[in-house]
Image (spheres, helix red, strand yellow):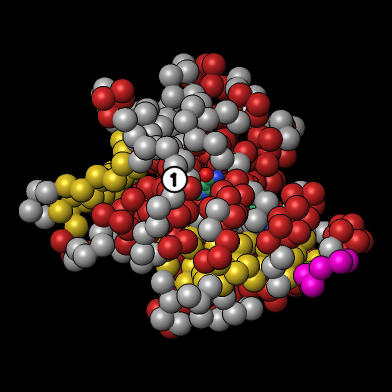
Amino acid sequence: MKKKRISIFGATGSVGQNTLDLIGRDRQSYEIVVLSGGSNIDLLIKAALEFEPQVVVAATNDQLDELKNALSKTQVEVGIGRAALLESASRKCDLAFSAIVGAAGLEPGLIALENGADLALANKESMVAAGSLVKQKAIESKCNLIPVDSEHSAIFQALQGENVNAIERVILTASGGAFRDWPLDKIAQATPEQASTHPNWNMGQRITIDSASMFNKALEIIEAKELFSLSSEQIEVLVHPQSYVHAIVGFCDGGMMAHLGPPDMRHAIGYALNYPNRKTLQLENLDFAKIGSLTFMAPDKERFPAIGLAYEVMSLGGISGAVFNAAKETTLDGFLSKQIGFLEMCPIVEKTIVKLCHVENCHKLEANLINILDIDKMARNIAAELIRMQRS
Ligand code: NAD
Ligand code: MG
């Protein structure tokens, strides 16, 4: 059987490592083309020695010697920096995992699509910042976009064999994150350490904090709109503390399809890895008798205003998602470096949207890569300035 050629952008992260875990259990089915990582050079070297990709790419120059030395007895090519990352994305593969965190993941995904790879999309920021562009590239190259985000994988799976025009609505579930039951005054004092623990999922730090602020769900609402071409009225969010139901699709005849599974990303990753087939993954099975009950509640939009911002961004349309995402990333950096408090993130994101979209109308520019990268930069500068003003 022909091996499936896989590239993984963000191989040292939580999604990347889970992907390699699955590939490692079924080595004869896959061949690795690219493994890229950021600053965790030890993990990148370990993965490169184990999987012997065509090329391995690290983020910064000071890692070059260490990487070259460690791989000197192998055939693995070594690349460093952004240009090497983008070049590696053009190498022929069957499926590219977009698992870099943040808008930095957009370009490798676009290049992989342009070069004929199906895209396993964990990087939700790509769809938020540039949904129409990503879809256009996929259509032009006749490639599949396969969601990896658990909720979107759930919707994608529920839609197999269905007509998307028959969708009445989709419901994204949310665990509620670390601060689901915290009073507002306590959330205001929350530290990055407290925000970095997730009740159910084991993920990278940034998405974990985004789960606590519900910015993650806000991004996912926009991601769902773009991936499945929905209107904003068709998308709902329900807090489901157990995280077993990942999403529900309601159809026009009143029937609903829910997708269930343990909170383990390897299910969604395995589905994308083997799409359109399914393979035995040997992961934990749900025991419903033990679970007993599943509960759902409406999200508290006052305590978690990020959800409201997602609807605001969808009504603005254009490239406002790029503004939203970039401002969100910048305020998250501000929170992580303790320049601003947890509850100060959302108002700064909102003010950035007001300035760039409501006042300057920048979101109406054509949705091409140059404009998206430009507006991303502008939003980061404005949000950074607002953070500075907040501190002075
Ligand atoms: P992570 O922080 O654990 O890993 C991110 C990866 O990207 C690492 O390999 C890191 O080195 C690399 N990286 C970061 N910045 C980079 C840059 N500027 N250039 C090149 N590489 C860079 O993140 P994660 O939790 O695995 O999430 C990855 C993506 O998947 C995010 O978009 C996230 O929203 C999405 N996602 C993650 C999960 C999860 O379970 N972790 C679930 C759903 C969706
Ligand atoms: Mg998700």
Q: Relative to the observer, which residue lies in front, 250 or 363?
A: 250
Q: Amino acid at mark 1?
A: Gln
Residue 355 shows in this picture: no
Residue 285 shows in this picture: yes
Rendered image quadrant of residue 259: top left
Number of numbered callouts drawn: 1
- Is the residue 312 above or below the residue 294 in the image? below
Magenta stretch contains residue 102? no
Label 1: few (<14), some (14–19) or many (≥20) C-alpha neighbours in 10 Å: few
- Quadrant of the snapshot with the C terminus: top right
Residue 278, x across and y down, in percent: 36, 59
Magenta stretch contains residue 76? yes
Q: Relative to the observer, which residue lies in front, 116 or 328?
A: 116
Residue at x 66%, y 34% (from the top left corner): 335
The magenta segment is: 72-77
Most frequent secondary structure within the magenta stretch: loop
Residue 309, x across and y down, in percent: 43, 44
Residue at x 11%, y 55% (from the top left corner): 252
The residue at the far left in this view is 253
Residue 323, x across and y down, in percent: 54, 56
- Is the residue 150 above or below the residue 296 in the image? below
**Residue annotated with mark 1:** 282
The kind of secondary structure element at disc 1 is loop
Q: Is residue 268 left or right of residue 7?
A: left
Rendered image quadrant of residue 187: top right
Residue at x 52%, y 16% (from the top left corner): 185
Residue 307, x across and y down, in percent: 40, 40
Q: Tell me if the residue at label 1 has its CB under 8 Å from ligand 1.
A: no
Q: Relative to the observer, which residue lies in front, 219 or 294?
A: 294
